[in-house]
Amino acid sequence: MPSFDIVSRVDLQEVDNAVNITKKAILSRYDFRNSKTEITIDKTDKKIHVTTEDDMKLRAVQDALIENLVKRKVDRKSLDPKPAEAAAHGMIQREIAIKEGVDSDTARTIVKMIKGKKLKVQAAIQENQVRVTGKKIDDLQEVMQMLRVGQMTIPLQFINMQR
């Protein structure tokens, strides 16, 4: 029986590349000369840390980072920026979490959307993904199209298409 999986994944290597490009851009910008601005990535916790002197520079670094992520085809929906907070020596820091996987609320929403379409397909939640099965590939493709058009809070990918 034909099926596919709905997942939400982020290529951490592309995120790392975007962080490194942003670091180089900060070093060459005039408004960041003699400033203590730092951007790091923690791949194990899937978090990006930005530390700088003031709010304007923090926004500039975040905008440059998002621009580089989009260029590297990482969807900005996968970022979850936390509020800025004070750090040592008058610095400001922000933590940006990288979201992966389909959480249970989003998975339930996806299943409701699929059932509301009244197609002959079944959707099952499996850990951090949703598996959709059906007899006709056309029905599965219609589900994919509906989810692409729908306004989801996370980026979705469709993998493991089996005929």
Image (cartoon, rainbow, N blue to C red):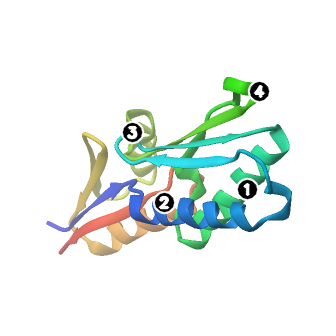
Residue bearing the label numbered 2: 15
Callout 1 touching callout 3 (CB < 8 Å) = no
Task: Give left or right: position of 42 versus 25.
Answer: left
Residue 11 appears in the picture as rendered: no
Residue 49 location (% of width, % of height): 56, 41
Q: Position of residue 68 (x, y in %)?
A: 62, 66
Of the two numbered discs 4 and 3 on the same chain, state the one appearing first in sequence: 3
User: What residue is shown with label 1?
Assistant: 63
Spot occupied by residue 27 in the image (x, y as percentages of width and height): 70, 62
Marks 4/3: CA–CA distance = 26 Å
- 8 shown above or below 17: above
Q: Secondary structure at mark 3?
A: loop
Q: Residue at x 30, y 49 (%)?
A: 130
Image disc number at residue 21: none
Q: How many other residues sit within 10 Å of disc 1, few (<14), some (14-19) or many (≥20)? A: few
Q: Using a 10 Å C-alpha cutoff, classify the residue at mark 2 as few (fewer than 14 neighbours), some (14 to 19) or many (20 or more).
A: many
* 3D distance between C-alphas at marks 4 and 2: 28 Å
In the picture, the quarter occupied by the C terminus is: bottom left
Q: In which image quadrant can residue 136 be found?
A: bottom left
Kind of element beneath mark 4: helix
